[in-house]
Image (cartoon, coloured by chain):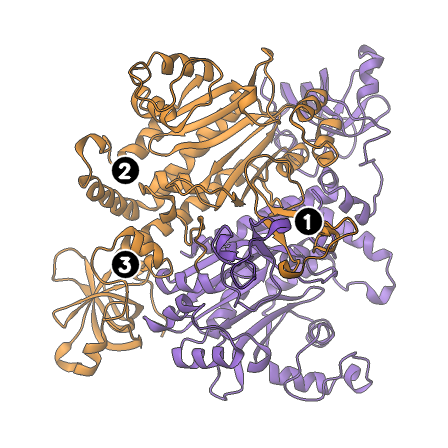
Chain colours: A orange, B purple
Amino acid sequence: MRHTKVKDLLNSSTTLQEINAKGWVRTFRNNQFIALNDGSTINNIQCVVDFENTSDEILKRITTGAAVSVTGDLVESKGAGQKYEIQVKKLEILGDSDAEKFPMQPKKHSLEFLRENAHLRVRTNAFGAIMRVRSVLSYAVHSYFQQKGFVYVNTPIITGADAEGAGEMFQVTSLPLDNLPKNEEGDIDYKKDFFGKHTNLTVSGQLEGETFAMALGQIYTFGPTFRAENSNTSRHLAEFWMIEPEVAFNDLNDNMDLAEDFIRYVIKYTMEKCPEDLKFLEGRLLEEEKTKPQAERSEMTLLEKLNFVLENNFKRVSYTEAIDILRDSTPNKKKKFQYIINEWGADLQSEHERFLVEKHFKSPVILFDYPANIKAFYMRLNEDGKTVRAMDILFPGIGEIVGGSQREERFDVLVEKMKALGIDEEELWWYLDTRRFGSSVHSGFGLGFERLVLFVTGMTNIRDVIPFPRTPQNADF
Amino acid sequence: MRHTKVKDLLNSSTTLQEINAKGWVRTFRNNQFIALNDGSTINNIQCVVDFENTSDEILKRITTGAAVSVTGDLVESKGAGQKYEIQVKKLEILGDSDAEKFPMQPKKHSLEFLRENAHLRVRTNAFGAIMRVRSVLSYAVHSYFQQKGFVYVNTPIITGADAEGAGEMFQVTSLPLDNLPKNEEGDIDYKKDFFGKHTNLTVSGQLEGETFAMALGQIYTFGPTFRAENSNTSRHLAEFWMIEPEVAFNDLNDNMDLAEDFIRYVIKYTMEKCPEDLKFLEGRLLEEEKTKPQAERSEMTLLEKLNFVLENNFKRVSYTEAIDILRDSTPNKKKKFQYIINEWGADLQSEHERFLVEKHFKSPVILFDYPANIKAFYMRLNEDGKTVRAMDILFPGIGEIVGGSQREERFDVLVEKMKALGIDEEELWWYLDTRRFGSSVHSGFGLGFERLVLFVTGMTNIRDVIPFPRTPQNADF
């Protein structure tokens, strides 16, 4: 007999005879009531066991975490809190779960403990909800771009290019580290490595993505990227998923419009598809905030924050304006900032970004036109000769969620910039080809997917929104 | 003025005044007719230049590969072959392309030459079509699973587990190879590596995927996987994208049903969304086949092959039946096979798979119930004690496109198998937890995405269906 998903049973329009459900026991009360979950929804279905006609041996095996198959009728529930329940006629234990040993007890566990059990934490309400929301958000990303005619491009993960400059890279090798081949000069002989050269894990698919945008017009990537940086913070992962659209003929304003429209679409889509998971996560966040001092609590609930983003345009503020605001701000004058803003050209720290977003504008902010010397080589130089058409989108509680720019389309200007920064032209010959042949204005951005998931789920540690987080000293599972 | 995509102009329901298009010149004929492409479609739009009122200096710069902006009216075309064309009133050269130097000349290039120019080959008709089809196929994958309530799971790319056994792995490290830290025993001190241990690139997300299936019910992965194997063939990549669904409570038959239904859905979806690209690729394949001896040519065109898959069930054949067929086959008796099939237990080679699919059944084939000792440790042992519930799906021209199995859900049987194979239980403690707590029947499979793209596009070398192929001695771009 084919089993029916719990979600479909709970959403049934009628009572049903002789159905089968399979799932895992969340709780078993009064020797009679199983709360059964199969992951299709955050909601459990109540299964009423005929305990008088069920052997003690079986009843004892109905423990939290056990896999069971129940056959019976879907009937209207007499209890409160659910429309339907299953009147069980036949119960089968598919897989036992030793109540003493099963780590996911029906009680509150710390997030740290759950991280150490990343293979089991998804059996909890919170992590089931987070992972379903993450999945729906992913699909929203694809839906948005595909509907608009963007082409999904899988840029390479293993790259021979060292020059992207977005961060420290992991090396990839098939050489035996305990017996490295050497060349005549006594150096490691990378000609003997798998790819015949030194290779790394990508930090960004942007440069390869640009070559495709200059042929297909509108493209996006959505894949894993890597940073070998020893950042043990709640906002950094060594392995994370990034979304990078790149559009021919778009200037920086088009780029900002795209980013805003995109973010609104994926949030709206997810709110429509995951109302129950988000409601649960909103409640979880409220509980968490109760443990904080009043001043640190959010003024808005999770759903209010999401609606705020849907209903309000992001503030677009030039770097120069932002510096003026920061210089005149109370925390700057009172020297509350760790890094005091004295003059134009300063790189903004997290504390400054948070002040702008959370205190001053109380809204997502797009900062643009940054000083050239604090941004990457490929960004379009403005006519002022000192700023570039860069943009960062800053979100409350998250900080930078998007970094993008209009790209330098002028061959000569780009080469000059590369020379000044010591970036090897030979190595990026293929990238320069996009400016040699049929170059044009184009723009793109990168959005760290996990930061988006953080925002939408209301979680506060990035380790909790990816299935198996990779961080310094941690690659378990 | 906002430009309109070429695809939208060609699909316009009326003529239009004052439109703007931007794209790249494919050809320029008679000093008058630009074939303009912007990547939104395989079709070019004809732009008629008023050459009498355009300076020679500009006309000379309208070369293959140049980026141009044309403003004018969309009018009915007087020429054959297109409904509409653009009567150009204003033409702007956005980016020049030196006709002498631009590698993508308007002529036929060899696939080898195009691979060396992977950053530019997407500006050709064939590679534009392949990459659009690849993108739509990707989306079909997500659509299928999301509609059915599967949760998309990003299993880790960097893994500390060596035990998956699916193939040779690449090592990932942040240690300086020219100055490796050593421990007291004189061995490399991996405690000083980024993750505090030896790490590799994943060969499969299956084991992690299973842990999520045992909580969320139905999950799928779709991400990059890696093999450090020196296989320089037209069917192997060192970096490729894999789709791995895993479903709780599914047995091997359910698994076969899922794989067939899935493959049909994604092919049908792509045929509906990409008729023009597929028609072009069908023509390309016909041309390519003309260069082959008659006997090697396909009996069906590309679209006929795709329709065949939609309309015919895959043949389901046990390994034991397959061995009987092969043993009695003409090539076996006449010793035409390189590896003669003598007895039950032999591992099937590509030549045998091709015989079954292309000569004997003339249909996609699902082989199942393989000998346990030629398959992976996690596959469900049958009651006969010598075969496992494995399945491989074999496609004409491609060979193995899917490998899957029902998983061994019995803790004791699994541990015994691991011991026999010398797989460390300690290392896979988390995987074994799925069998310790609430275990149940479950199944899944892996589908190599590029092999699917090969089949759908009719291309014959896997390097031609991924943007930037990674193969032995090659990690360019």
**In the figure, residue A218 lies in which quadrant?**
top right
Q: CA distance from mark 1 to mark 3?
A: 41 Å
Which residue, as the protein is rendered here, is positioned at the far front? Answer: B184
Q: Nearer the viewer, mark 2 or mark 3?
A: 2
Q: Amino acid at mark 1?
A: Leu
Could you say where residue B63 lies in the image, as x and y percent from the top left?
81, 25
SS for callout 2: helix
SS for callout 1: helix
Q: Amino acid at mark 2?
A: Leu
What residue would you read off at disc 1?
B278
SS for callout 3: loop
Q: CA distance from mark 2 to mark 1?
A: 45 Å
Q: Are marks 2 and 3 on the same chain?
A: yes
**Residue A312 in view:** no
Q: Are marks 1 and 3 on the same chain?
A: no
Q: Which residue occupies the foreground of this view, A129 or A403?
A: A403
Q: Is residue A326 left or right of residue B241?
A: left
Could you say where residue B475 lies in the image, as x and y percent from the top left?
70, 48
Binning the other alpha carbons within 10 Å of mark 3 as few (below 14), some (14 to 19) or many (20 upward) gives few
* A200 vs B339: above or below: above
Image point 23% across, 77% down: which residue?
A61
Q: CA distance from mark 2 to mark 3?
A: 29 Å
